[in-house]
Image (tube, rainbow, N blue to C red):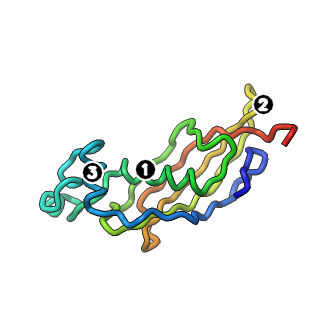
Amino acid sequence: MTILYLDDLAPGQTFEGKSETPALTPEAIKTYARQYDPQPFHLDEAAAAKSLFGGLAASGWHTASLTMSLIAADVPLAGGIIGAGVEEMRWPRPVRPGDRLRIVSEVLEVRASKSKPEQGLTKLRTTTLNHKNEPVQIMTANLVVPRRPASV
């Protein structure tokens, strides 16, 4: 995979994820929730069935964590994925046991820094899709990306 610098990015450019998470198990959903988001609809099938989710659902933060691992694997930015802020994060549908996730990311904006000429920002919208191609998370984030050094 070719490492990309700010100078290589342009609005409209997309990254179609090649990576996919393993199918989420009820235990994986509960393990994450016990540590980071201990709410009944993430921890207990019976309680989840009575909730607005109508069944066990992964925490949105679990989805965000899985999305981060997919972005790191599939968006080859020089310097890594360094966030400068999230403008939007939505979870249009829950992640369920059995779901496998992948991403599609689109560059929305690229701008060089005026105060730090060696870097800039790119606005990236990443849609996380389940194995049915349904969006389960939409995130728009600003990322710090280095400019191509003169020697590269």
* Residue type of the residue flagged with mark 1: Ala
The image shows residue 117, relative to residue 13, as above or below, that is above
Q: Secondary structure at mark 2?
A: loop
- Please indicate whether residue 32 sits to the left or right of residue 91 in the image: left
In this view, which residue lies farthest toward the top?
115
Between the residue at mark 3 and the residue at mark 2, the CA separation in whole angstroms equals 44 Å
Between the residue at mark 3 and the residue at mark 1, the CA separation in whole angstroms equals 15 Å
The image shows residue 110, relative to residue 98, as above or below, that is above
Residue depicted at x 60% and y 50%: 124
Q: Which residue is mark 2?
A: 117
Look at the numbered discs 3 and 2 and tell me whether their residues touch, using CB distance below 8 Å. Answer: no
Work out whether residue 115 or residue 23 is closer to the camera in this orientation and state it: 23
* Residue type of the residue flagged with mark 2: Pro
Q: Residues within 10 Å of mark 2 (few under 14, many from 20)?
A: few
In this view, which residue lies farthest toward the bottom?
132
| Among the two numbered marks 3 and 1 on one chain, the one whose residue lies closer to the N terminus | 3
Task: Give the quarter of the figure containing the N terminus.
Answer: bottom right
Q: Which residue is mark 3?
A: 31
The image shows residue 92, relative to residue 7, as above or below, that is below
**Picture quadrant where residue 119 is located:** top right
Q: Nearer the viewer, mark 3 or mark 1?
A: 3
User: How far across and how far down the image is residue 129, in percent?
Assistant: 46, 65
Q: Which residue is mark 1?
A: 64
